[in-house]
Image (cartoon, rainbow, N blue to C red):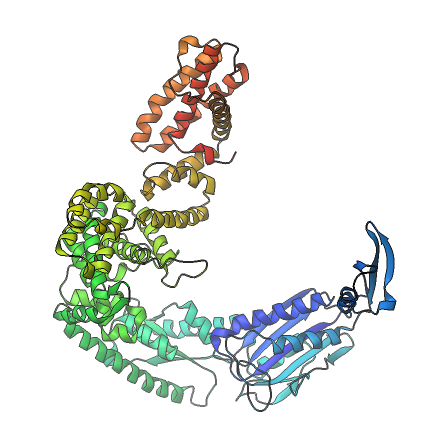
């Protein structure tokens, strides 16, 4: 069985596209070969800046003969139907068989195909792959019609076995496949032939090309860290930069360079970002001071002067870049010392969203909500409000304009420069977090208050204008914001009715959106509504509380505040389900807890779900669930049949069987434990008390017939079942839990 080697040699492929392109090449070719009837033992794809390579081991030499029988239309069917069947099957009418079928005689086509040699199949599959390759961007060059990410120079395609290597006959837009390739552009430019993958990789290395990206990355990191260590320094770890630089060179040459003394006092993040984004340099840090003092660059060529000329050029370019950064930094510090007033004023002219107003208006809403949230997270309300007002000031700074990824971080520096409280400065950086499922969650109270306010304002704003995520589209990252709220609440054990914050912010958005259409009286009514929400936290109740006041001025005001808070809360619950499923909590357990009161208290909700999940994983929990379902089913059927509700209390004096009396006693005992435990939110104790009901409920159903002949006894037993149902439903809605 031969081995297949393919190389597509071109001008430099952008580093960000290389890994996916290699994976696409492997998938397209192997899928095509398998579809054509070939099998293989293994495949591996490789990439360098100038080539995509695919090696396939143990490829079958030819595809097998095949015979397929295809059922066609009935005999006597219209000619159009028969002709269409003939075209699809690729046979002539005289080749059709007529066979008896359940509904009469029908045509059958027997399609026999001879197997084909591997080289013909490979040529066909590779031609299709090249012509339809899924580059994010591609180009044409010269007079040809072929499109590739950069001009494609040559195709290496050989099948090799014990007898030697055979070139697969292939011509793609004038590029004829062969058995030759080239090494490094400057250090190994001559063409050479290869006989297989091992020969190919070895000759490439002799021609100064390292084929494997992980090997290039390892070389870069090993040499960079060694050079830094020799000077008592350390390289700042950056895996994404390492992967990118490994995609920029075929023969890595690591060089350690100097940063000018004028720039060493810039914030380390500024240096690191500037060098990474503009120059693809690694930052080298003094481990004792945390200061960035040098850089590592990776050249693609060895030089006679050991890279001195390359380093001199890089240092000159870097100096120009850092001069800009230093200018931005110094200008920004002057504004920061004045309390960042200019930046805050300029945000009045920055549109956040055409329906939601400016960044300055958004900051006002966030500040108001952060002040409300502060007591819930044990933060100083004044500090939380101040932090919210300055948290986004750095968006107007020159440094963040140049490097948007530094937003928040620069706010921390500028707030410190302005002499603001350290908690305020920290909130400027941390209020954006968490940005993703693995991002750190802020724990400083002021930071938590502002982070929650920022995300809740974002969500309520887009709900207020009915621009919610749909399907896979989420242009404003609202799913991420909701997950951020969930993680902030749970990580900090925040006890709050989320609906209260949602309602308050929805009203603020409606004031902003309808401000020009409201008179002074209507605005007073809305402010009264905000006050009611602050006290009660229930949208409907708040509306009712101020409805009389509103009606004197304008009944239409209430109509301008549609209650979308329930829909937004449901969105939070959907995100919470995803979050808890990743934790291993079943969807039906989550639904059972969502059905309970106070389901906008996420901490309470999750504590209940975790306790219920743990309980149901025990034998007692699973068996009690079955007992509950049996009791609920019998009771539901009886209530539907009798047209009455059996909820008036069972009396032990009508109990006849010992197991019936034992269940009365067990239920009374459990209720005395479960009720205070639920009030204290001690779900573990409540579940333990429920577990004790398993045995008496099992015994009751074993020994007792609920539908007794005596109507009094039957009614009493049904009321007893209601007591089981009531106690169990007080913990969670077990009716939605799957058995």
Report the quarter where the N terminus lies. bottom right
The picture places residue 120, in percent across and down from the top left corner, at 75, 76
Task: Identify the residue at image location x=39%, y=87%.
Answer: 308
* Left or right: where 508 falls relative to 12: left
Relative depth, front residue between 297 and 724: 724
Q: Residue at x 48, y 10 (%)?
A: 658
**In terms of depth relative to the viewer, which is nearer, 467 or 516?**
516
- Compared with residue 716, is residue 604 higher up or lower down, i.e. above or below? below
Residue closer to the observer: 425 or 219:
425
- Residue 239 can be seen in this image: yes
In the displayed structure, 128 sits above or below 697; it is: below
Tell me if residue 286 can be seen. Answer: no
Q: Is residue 150 left or right of residue 129?
A: left
Q: Residue at x 29, y 60 (%)?
A: 432
Q: Is residue 510 above or below residue 220?
A: above
Above or below 112: residue 441 = above
Q: Position of residue 224 (x, y in %)?
A: 41, 74
| Quarter residue 211 falls in | bottom right
Residue 84 placement (x, y as % from top left): 75, 67
How far from the left and from the top, in percent, is residue 50?
54, 81
Q: Quadrant of residue 92?
A: bottom right
């Amino acid at each position: 069985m031969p081995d297949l080697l393919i190389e597509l040699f071109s001008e430099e492929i952008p580093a960000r596209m290389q890994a996916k392109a290699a994976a696409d090449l492997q998938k397209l070719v192997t899928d095509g070969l398998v579809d054509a009837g070939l099998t293989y033992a293994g495949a591996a794809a490789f990439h360098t800046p100038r080539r995509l390579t695919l090696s396939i081991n143990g490829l079958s030499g030819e595809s097998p003969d095949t015979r397929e029988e295809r059922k066609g239309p009935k005999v006597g069917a219209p000619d159009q139907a028969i002709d269409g069947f003939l075209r699809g099957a690729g046979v002539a009418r005289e080749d059709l068989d007529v066979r008896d079928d359940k509904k009469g005689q029908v045509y059958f086509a027997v399609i026999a195909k001879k197997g084909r040699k591997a080289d013909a199949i490979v040529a066909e599959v590779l031609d299709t792959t090249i012509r339809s390759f899924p580059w994010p961007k591609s180009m044409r060059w010269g007079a040809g019609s072929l499109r590739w990410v950069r001009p494609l120079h040559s195709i290496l395609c050989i099948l090799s076995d014990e007898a030697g290597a055979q070139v697969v006959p292939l011509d793609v837009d004038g590029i004829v496949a062969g058995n030759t390739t080239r090494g490094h552009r400057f250090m190994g430019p001559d063409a050479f032939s290869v006989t297989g993958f091992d020969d190919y990789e070895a000759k490439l290395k002799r021609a100064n090309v390292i084929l494997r990206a992980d090997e290039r990355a390892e070389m870069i990191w090993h040499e960079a860290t060694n050079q830094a260590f020799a000077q008592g320094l350390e390289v700042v770890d950056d895996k994404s930069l390492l992967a990118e630089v490994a995609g920029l060179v075929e023969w890595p040459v690591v060089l350690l360079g100097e940063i000018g003394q004028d720039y060493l006092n810039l914030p380390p993040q500024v240096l690191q970002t500037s060098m990474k984004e503009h120059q693809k340099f690694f930052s080298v840090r003094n481990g004792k001071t945390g200061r960035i003092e040098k850089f590592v660059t990776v050249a693609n060529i060895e030089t006679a002067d050991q890279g001195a000329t390359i380093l001199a050029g890089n240092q000159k370019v870097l100096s120009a870049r850092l001069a800009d950064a230093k200018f931005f930094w110094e200008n920004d510090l002057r504004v920061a010392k004045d309390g960042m007033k200019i930046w805050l004023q300029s945000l009045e002219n920055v549109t956040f969203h055409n329906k939601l107003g400016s960044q300055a208006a958004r900051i006002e809403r966030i500040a108001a909500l952060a002040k409300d949230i502060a007591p819930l997270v044990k933060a100083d309300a004044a500090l939380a409000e101040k932090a919210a007002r300055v948290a986004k000031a750095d968006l107007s700074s020159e440094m963040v304009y140049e490097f948007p990824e530094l937003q928040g971080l620069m706010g921390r520096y500028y707030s410190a420069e302005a002499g603001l409280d350290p908690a305020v400065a920290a909130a400027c950086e941390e209020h954006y977090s968490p940005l993703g499922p693995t991002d750190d969650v802020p724990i400083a109270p002021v930071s938590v208050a502002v982070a929650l306010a920022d995300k809740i304002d974002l969500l309520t704003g887009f709900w207020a204008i009915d621009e919610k995520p749909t399907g896979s589209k989420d242009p404003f990252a609202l799913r991420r914001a909701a997950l951020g709220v969930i993680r902030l609440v749970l990580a900090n054990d925040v006890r709050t009715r989320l609906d209260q914050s949602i309602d308050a912010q929805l009203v603020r958005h409606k004031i902003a959106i309808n401000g020009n259409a409201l008179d002074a009286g209507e605005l007073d009514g809305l402010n009264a509504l905000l006050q009611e929400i602050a006290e009660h936290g229930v949208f409907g109740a708040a509306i009712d509380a101020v409805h009389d006041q509103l009606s004197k001025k304008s009944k239409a005001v209430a109509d301008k505040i549609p209650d979308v808070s329930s829909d937004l809360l449901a969105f939070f619950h959907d995100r919470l389900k995803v979050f808890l499923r990743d934790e291993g909590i079943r969807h039906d357990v989550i639904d059972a807890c969502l059905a309970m009161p106070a389901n906008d208290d996420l901490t309470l909700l999750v504590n209940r779900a975790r306790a219920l999940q743990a309980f149901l994983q025990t034998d007692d929990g699973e068996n009690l669930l079955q007992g509950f379902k049996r009791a609920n089913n019998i009771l539901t059927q009886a209530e539907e049949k009798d047209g009455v509700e059996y909820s008036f209390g069972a009396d032990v004096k009508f109990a006849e069987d010992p197991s019936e009396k034992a269940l009365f006693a067990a239920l009374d005992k459990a209720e005395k434990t479960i009720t205070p435990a639920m009030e204290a939110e001690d779900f573990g104790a409540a579940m333990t008390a429920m577990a004790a009901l398993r045995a008496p409920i099992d015994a009751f159903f074993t020994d007792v017939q609920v539908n007794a002949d005596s109507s009094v006894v039957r009614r009493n037993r049904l009321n007893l079942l209601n007591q089981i149902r009531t106690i169990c439903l007080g913990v969670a809605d077990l009716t939605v839990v799957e058995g």
